[in-house]
Image (cartoon, rainbow, N blue to C red):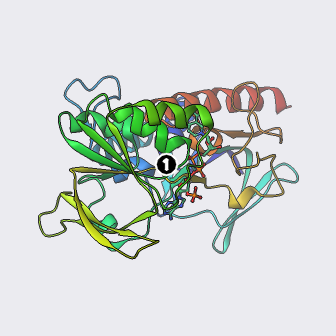
Amino acid sequence: MRNVIIIGSGPAGLTAAIYTARANLNPLVFEGYGAGGQLMLTTMVENFPGFPEGILGPQLMEDMRKQAERFGAELIRKDVTGVDLSQRPFKIQVEENTYETKSLIIASGASAKLLGLESEKKLMGRGVTTCATCDGFFYRGQEVAVVGGGDSAMEEAIFLTKFATKVTVIHRRDKLRASKIMQEKAFKNPKIEFMWNSVVEKVLDENLGKVTGALIRNVKTGELIEKKFSGLFIAIGHTPNTQLFVGQLELDEQGYIITRNGTLTSVPGVFAAGDVQDHVYRQAITAAGSGCMAAMDAEKFLEHSEP
Ligand code: NAP
């Protein structure tokens, strides 16, 4: 029987691990096979406070992991395959093993949707990115492109005009999905240009190991053109990793866990932190902050639920 099990090992999960370990709760963390979360897909992180020269995303995660281990957190690099939250202790299934826990912190994150191209995978973190807030700064004085037609794509495109000389929005239809107000802002911005009915066929240049542009196909005419730019921002939405909790926890219409009063979910004793419950801020630092909150909420819950 564990005091607390943590699902996920991004900034939220590992911060929760550090705090619960230091509270002598002996946390058990299921890191998942994609351990480290979305920061493993980035290169330099320059907006995490405390690193004036920046730090590589994977290095930051390795350091957080070491810090959690130093205080006694137990980490297992496996995916949780099932949960039963219908009664306490909660049951956590990991392949053939079942673990029991008095409290649970869910920090399983969200995954940025990707186009699914081989070239996109190869150049991820080398010019292909899913976060303008994180990487926009690197493109000062350069041309970039954004894929997507929703609010995220418009927000990223507008943000990127602070740095880039030109931002091309590549959208697969001839109408945006974004809210009217975001559309107006984007249309009014002289640095933003639109390529309608267009999809990225291939990101260039795998041989150079960096983004130099893309082959773009017009879905109406079939025409294929080469467009030059040095950064490609994929903004086609995120999927919260909440499949395990459907029917057991209150989720919003997009599948994110609903939290109230900090990190409390609809089941007492179950807490959620990081991107799995946040589709607005989505930053490493906000995820870490909410991981700390979840640890403190779990600690308080355990104090009050014990005889
Ligand atoms: P979204 O609204 O689902 O939009 C995704 C966009 O990506 C759509 O334009 C979609 O095209 C396109 N897309 C999806 N899959 C694609 C693919 N495989 N290839 C090419 N294009 C693809 O996602 P979001 O923009 O991340 O927004 C999510 C939610 O957060 C929305 O409710 C949004 O309003 C909200 N949000 C609000 C703000 C704000 O108010 N400031 C900012 C960010 C997000 P189609 O249009 O053809 O489907």
Crowd tier of the residue under label 1, counting other residues whose Cα lies within 10 Å: few below 14, some 14–19, many 20 or above? many
Q: Is mark 1 on a helix, strand or loop?
A: loop
Q: Which residue lies furthest to the left in this view?
A: 208
Exactly how many numbered labels are in the figure? 1
The residue lying toward the viewer, choosing from 257 and 72, is 257
Residue nearest the observer in this picture, 159 or 291: 159
Residue 227 relative to residue 283: left or right:
left
Residue drawn at (69%, 28%) of the image:
297
Q: As displayed, is residue 282 above or below residue 224?
A: above
Against 200, residue 63 (above or below) is above
Q: Quadrant of residue 92?
A: bottom right
Examine the image and state in which quarter residue 273 appears: top right
Q: Nearer the viewer, residue 83 or 103?
A: 83
Residue 75: x and y in percent read 49, 52
Q: In which quarter of the image is the C terminus?
A: top right
Q: Which amino acid does label 1 sit on?
A: Ser
Q: Kindly indicate the quadrant of the structure image that contains residue 143.
A: top left
**Circle 1 sits on which residue?**
9
User: Residue at left 76%, top 49%?
Assistant: 253
> Residue 125, how many percent across, how many down?
28, 53
